[in-house]
Each structure stands twice: as C-alpha cells, then as structure tokens.
Amino acid sequence: MNNYRTIYDAVGGFEGITRIVEAFYPRVQKHPLLAPLFPEDIFPVMEKQALFLSQFFGGPALYSDQYGHPMMRARHMPFPITPERAEAWLSCMRGALEENGLPAELQEIVLERLSGPAHHFVNTNETNEQET
Ligand code: HEM
C-alpha cells in the first residue's frame, strides 16, 4: 500500500470494499459458529458493513452519516461473541480477501486492523447459542 494514503484507497475504494463484503457474508452464513447469529436476509447487514468499513479504513464517513456514532462494541452486545467467534469472523474475512486477490501484504494489514476490534467485541466465554 506504499503509494496509497489509506487502506480504503488500497483496496479499491467503495467498490473494492463492496466486493470484499460480498465475499465475506456467504462465508459467515456457512460458518457453524457464526451463521446462527445472523438474520436470513443478510443484505441490510452487508450494506451497513460496506458503509462502516469504508469509514473504518479511512474513506468517507458513510456509516456515521446514516447511523450516527458507530459504538460498535455496544451494537454487538446483544450477540454472544466468544473468542472462537472472533477468530471465525477473522478467518471468514481472510477468505474474502484471498478470494478478491488482494496482495498478501495488504491482506495482512487489513486483518491486523480488524483483529483489534474483533477481539474487543468479545463479550462472553459461553459457546452456547444466543438466547432470545
Ligand atoms: C468478533 C466477531 C463478530 C461477530 C460474531 C459479529 C456479529 C455481528 C452480528 C450478529 C451483527 C448483527 C446482524 C444483524 O443486524 O442482525 C453484526 C453487525 C455488524 N457488525 Fe459485526 N461481528 C463481529 C465483528 C465485527 C467487526 C470486527 C466489525 C468491524 C470492525 C463488525 C462490524 C459490524 C457492523 C458495521 C455491523 C452492522 C451494525 C449496525 O447494525 O448498524 N463486526 N455483527
């Protein structure tokens, strides 16, 4: 990413983010630890994630413009996020980055930036399913 100012630019801007998100959620929906947490209609989640990752990676503040302060840890509190689920989330992201053919070095940078929040969102050690 040497010649890029932001990760957002390096991955190809909003279009690049969108392609990553489109490769990511089918993996999430197939993952036994993650699938039960997500709604069947995944498109609204995909849309929000594309807006969020754009701003998270240094692009325009698209998420905050529509939804206000991200407060992402708080938004994840209703869901039982275990350390195993954080790792699963990151492994789905790794797959999505590979599928999009991002340079290996850029993949590592992206994953490193996401790994902090992913572990920060861990809110339980209980591996049982969500109780509603
Ligand atoms: C650690 C593992 C993670 C799990 C298990 C997880 C799970 C979830 C779930 C279940 C939802 C709600 C889906 C719905 O609307 O019903 C959600 C929403 C979301 N997640 Fe995660 N997530 C994780 C990590 C992350 C990370 C690392 C990021 C970005 C840094 C992220 C960004 C988002 C965004 C932007 C939304 C939409 C928030 C909204 O409703 O406005 N998540 N996540």
Image (cartoon, rainbow, N blue to C red):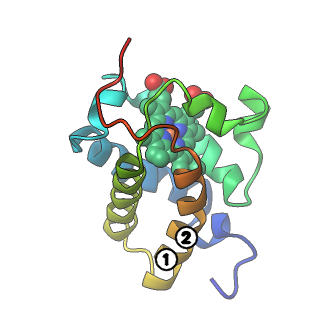
Which circle marks residue 75 in the picture? none
**Visible in this render: residue 102?**
yes
Give the class, few, some or many, for how many residues have Cα within 10 Å of label 2's Cα (few <14, many ≥20). Answer: few
Q: Position of residue 25 (x, y in %)?
A: 35, 43
Which circle marks residue 112 in the picture? 2
Residue at 49%, 77% (x, y): give it: 108
Q: Which residue is mark 1?
A: 108
Give the class, few, some or many, for how many residues have Cα within 10 Å of label 1's Cα (few <14, many ≥20). Answer: some
Specify the amino acid type for callout 2. Glu
Choose between 90 and 18: the one closer to the eye: 90
Q: Position of residue 130 (x, y in %)?
A: 35, 23
For residue 100, above or below residue 119: below
3D distance between C-alphas at marks 1 and 2: 6 Å
From the viewer's perspective, tell me whether residue 129 is left or right of residue 65.
Answer: left
Specify the amino acid type for callout 1. Glu
Q: Position of residue 123 (x, y in %)?
A: 52, 38
Q: Quadrant of residue 125?
A: top left
Q: Secondary structure at mark 1?
A: helix
From the viewer's perspective, tell me whether residue 86 is left or right of residue 113.
Answer: left
Residue at 28%, 43% (x, y): give it: 26
